[in-house]
Image (cartoon, coloured by chain):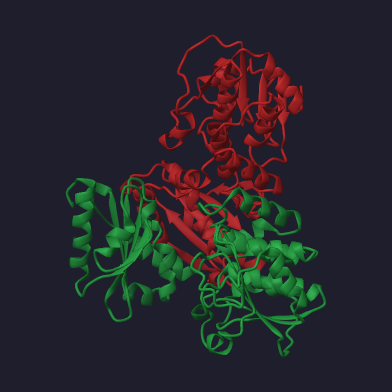
Chain colours: A green, B red
Amino acid sequence: MNVDTRGAAALLQKMDRVLILTHKNPDGDTLGSAAALCRALLSLGKQARIVNAEPIPSKYDYLFEGLPDESFEPDAVVAVDVADVKLLGDPLEEQYADRIDLCIDHHLSNKHFAKALLLEDDDAAAVMPVYRVLQELNVDITPAIATALYTGLSTDTGCFRYSNASAEAYRMGAEFIDRGADNADINVRMFETKSLGYFQLLSRVLESMRLFCGGQVSVLKITRQMLDETGNADDACEPLASISRQIEGVKCGITMRQKKDGTYKFSLRTHEPLDASRLGALLGGGGHMRAAGCDAGPDEEESLQILLTQIAKELDCSVE
Amino acid sequence: MNVDTRGAAALLQKMDRVLILTHKNPDGDTLGSAAALCRALLSLGKQARIVNAEPIPSKYDYLFEGLPDESFEPDAVVAVDVADVKLLGDPLEEQYADRIDLCIDHHLSNKHFAKALLLEDDDAAAVMPVYRVLQELNVDITPAIATALYTGLSTDTGCFRYSNASAEAYRMGAEFIDRGADNADINVRMFETKSLGYFQLLSRVLESMRLFCGGQVSVLKITRQMLDETGNADDACEPLASISRQIEGVKCGITMRQKKDGTYKFSLRTHEPLDASRLGALLGGGGHMRAAGCDAGPDEEESLQILLTQIAKELDCSVE
């Protein structure tokens, strides 16, 4: 059943002991939504706690400061920023998949698994519908709640940089700052702190850069050796994929990431006129117009040549 | 004479042929302020053009699209985002220093050189007072004007990331988006496009990284050779100075930049409890609490030791 802001607020109003679930591999939006909702429910005299399938990275600790750590038998389960029960992760998926009373989300791809769903797919972040529900509930937006809401909004919009950062997102950002979110501090925590290993990996990866098609295609290669020697796990590759496209004149950035089995995964990032999803499809992958992915064949350089040949054709140039 | 928004608007109202000056080494705020003001004055039936002492980097071309390139004898000169006539650069300083009728600025350090000054030093960017003046003048905020205003606001706040990004700055950002600024496109142009040489230099500089004080101090060294071999000028070092402090656990980042004469300049960036300006003063330099600079002595490694010894003392650890 789909509900609107008022419907979601009415459901929360009736709950007394609320378990709040976030998605696995938690980010600022799912954690910010959960922290804001948890604090709001507590302020309304209810019991509430957040459960996550995985340990929460320490950089998010500030979101949960002062929250009680009490166990109770929930009478309701609410998921925030969760598009699919599979994203709850083990063991939460097994435990709660069929008993989620309310889901508040902003993913168009939401699988409608909850008994009631508040889905606002025009919103840049799940904290946006969460905030509207808290307003409907007349919750006093304390600095801690504003901090949690701002965190979700800022992280899901790349600090208000991406195309999902709408005028409404900016206005909400302003309201969160008014209510006590220390935006500069939050953004330093979220965006300006990286591990030493990340920078060491970045140096190695940039060294590997190759250019093709007269500088219109850049290729970065991340090997297991680079990851191992700099003490990084696979998730460190994620932010590196966007670098290849940031180079002046580059229309397609290809990041080749070696998987644990030795084969490669390609991340494709494009500017006009190249369609990343169509390029990825050449190797059996897919994605969006500007960002896509695919698995390379056993010889990754041969797979790269297939992509380069097609790109050269589309850009009407030679591969070199 | 200091004027308020209304006073500045009244002055502009009386001008007919307006020359708009920006500061040298132009950035998004001075150029965005100038482009917005120029378009606004044209829309009011006046003549207006922008003059800059230096060529404007091509990435800002979109701000000036469609502006007429007509020469005329001005009856008034307006400077935007210019804190000091020295910042006009040659030959504008000599030509206009004593005949600037109005300056619209946000720098606390403004030297009050203009006949009339609208100074809003709480504002994150000069486009903020410019926008208020345009509103006072009942200017129709077209997409081109909104684009110029958004550009200034976003570039001076690091895309709404820095502590100067107030709630009001966010609200204005929302208004500019409402009026047609394509924020995602502008931010890609301003923040996500870097030269190949920049990334090549970044790789080399990260390779040079050394850590001291148990990982609490990071030191990056940029030699002339690195700059020359990657085809970079000195200004490429500017964004690199902030990297040293972004490493997890680092309380002081020191970036050593070799000058053309072979000696080094140090850029210091600190987190609590270290005071960058006090550290810089040890070598005769200065600056702010979190960002300062100083010149090294003839032996730059010896100068580095002086800083490290003091930092180790303050952090109560050994230099290693």
The answer to whether residue B310 is visible is no
* Up-down relation of residue B164 to residue B145 (above or below): below
Give the residue at the far front of this rendering: A1
Image quarter of residue B98? top right
Percent of width and height locating residue B175 = 64, 41
* Quadrant position of the N terminus of chain A in the picture: bottom right
Q: Which one is in front, B262 or A184?
A: A184
Q: Which one is in front, B242 or B180?
A: B180
* Up-down relation of residue A113 to residue B82 (above or below): below
* Up-down relation of residue B280 to residue A109 (above or below): above
Percent of width and height locating residue B157 = 60, 46
Residue B255 horizontal side relative to residue A281, left or right: right
Q: Residue at x 55, y 25 (%)?
A: B39
Q: Residue at x 48, y 23 (%)?
A: B67
The answer to whether residue A90 is visible is yes
Percent of width and height locating residue B153 = 60, 41
Image quarter of residue B97? top right
Residue B199 horizontal side relative to residue A262, left or right: right
Give the residue at the far right of this rendering: A45
Percent of width and height locating residue B209 = 44, 63
Image quarter of residue B146? top right
Q: Residue at x 57, y 29 (%)?
A: B36
Counting every numbered tag in the picture gives 0
Residue B195 horizontal side relative to residue B255, left or right: left
Q: Which one is in front, A252 or B105?
A: A252
